[in-house]
Image (spheres, rainbow, N blue to C red):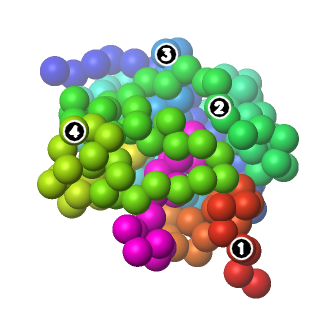
Amino acid sequence: MTTQLTHFVDEMDSPIGKLTIVATDQGVCHINFGELDASTVNIKTWLKKNGRKGELIRSKDHLRPVCEQLEDYFARKRIEFDLPVDLCGTPFQKKVWNVLRTIEYGTTKSYKQIAQEIGAPKAIRAIGGANNKNPIPIIIPCHRVIGSNGNMVGYGGGLDKKEILLGLEGAIEQIS
């Protein structure tokens, strides 16, 4: 099924580099690590894969609420987001992402804990797969998921970004 929507896009600076943000009138739907020019191909691929057609329009005004909440988060003035989201994913992925949204600021959970919470204790690898497909990192805090042994494992933006985010939240000591 293809959905025709206008997708608003813009980029912002952050302590982990440029972020390119995409939203519809329904809510934020995608965050890509990197500048808009470099992210456009990834965004168009993501839109196509998720059956979305329509214009991609650059709009600071439309994305201002998202950027402001992200800026507040990076300035340690916000510990949770109250933005509408427009998620594309399988029912399993959405179930995982909803659990991720309950992980409190400054805390972490393991993939195993997430699997147990959704009632699928053997689905640890599938949890990792859903985490990897999270279209709105930071807002859906997949960076708060770590290995059962406490080690940093996998992050779409790179482990360096994951460490910065967890350090910002006080979940780990910042590595200099």
For the residues labelled 4 and 1, the Cα–Cα distance comes to: 32 Å
Q: Secondary structure at mark 3?
A: loop
Q: Earlier in the sequence, mark 2 or mark 3?
A: 3
For the residues labelled 1 and 3, the Cα–Cα distance comes to: 37 Å
| Residue at image mark 3 | 26
Q: Amino acid at mark 2?
A: Phe
The residue under the point 65% across, 31% down is 81
For the residues labelled 2 and 1, the Cα–Cα distance comes to: 23 Å
Q: Secondary structure at mark 2?
A: loop
Residue in front for this viewpoint, 96 or 49: 96
Magenta residue span? 137-153
Q: Amino acid at mark 1?
A: Glu
Q: Amino acid at mark 3?
A: Gln
| Residue at image mark 1 | 173
Is the residue under label 3 in contact with that under label 1 (CB below 8 Å)?
no
What label does residue 39 carry, if any?
A: none
Q: Earlier in the sequence, mark 1 or mark 3?
A: 3
Q: Earlier in the sequence, mark 2 or mark 1?
A: 2
Placement of the N terminus among the 4 image quadrants: top left
The residue under the point 39% across, 46% down is 134
For the residues labelled 3 and 4, the Cα–Cα distance comes to: 30 Å
Is the residue under label 4 in contact with that under label 3 (CB below 8 Å)?
no
| Residue at image mark 4 | 119
Depth check, mark 2 against mark 3: the one in front is 2
